[in-house]
Image (cartoon, rainbow, N blue to C red):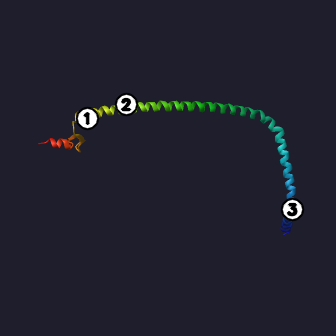
Amino acid sequence: MMKRIAKFVLKRAWRLAAPLRRPLVRRIDARISMLVSNTVNSRILPELVPPLGLILERLERIELTLARADGATAAMTEEIDLVLNGLSREIFQVQVEALRRIVDQESRHAGPGLSLIAETGEEEAIRRPATAAERSMVG
């Protein structure tokens, strides 16, 4: 019973002291933060500055190397593009010439009619209709 009363009184006192406690806690927190910050700045930063400088120099060299590599890659890409365009143009011309030769050979062998492949898979000659001049020649 006594414990419960003491607990109730202490809780009530803690709540009532809140307006006084908050500014005090803020000041203590600010003081501790300042001490930690000063300690870090005075002890750790002087040891970190030289390695950070080396890291910065290395990063700059890496960036320069990457820029050079990017330029070389762009040049190689353009060159490969030109080579592939020329190669595809030559292949296209060769194929067109081969098709022309095939068409010329087929037209010499086929004669005057059109040629279709029947459902049986064999080629059949189809006579084209006679023109007006050919019709007038009959008879």
**Nearer the N terminus, badge 1 or badge 3?**
3
Camera-side mark, 1 or 3: 1
Q: Is residue 130 visible?
A: no
Instruction: Name the element at disc 1.
Output: helix
**Nearer the N terminus, badge 2 or badge 1?**
2
Q: Which mark is residue 56?
A: none
Q: Which mark is residue 107?
A: 1
Which quadrant of the structure image shows residue 10? bottom right
Q: CA distance from mark 3 to mark 2?
A: 94 Å
User: Which of the image's four quarters has the C terminus?
Assistant: top left
Circle 3 is placed at which residue position? 19
Give amino acid for label 1.
Ser
Q: CA distance from mark 1 to mark 3?
A: 107 Å
Give amino acid for label 3.
Pro
Camera-side mark, 2 or 1: 1
- Which residue is at 22% across, 36% downward? 110
Instruction: Name the element at disc 3.
Output: helix
Which quadrant of the structure image shows residue 35? top right
- Whole-percent x, y for residue 58 in the image: 69, 31
- Whole-percent x, y for residue 19 in the image: 86, 62
Instruction: Name the element at disc 2.
Output: helix
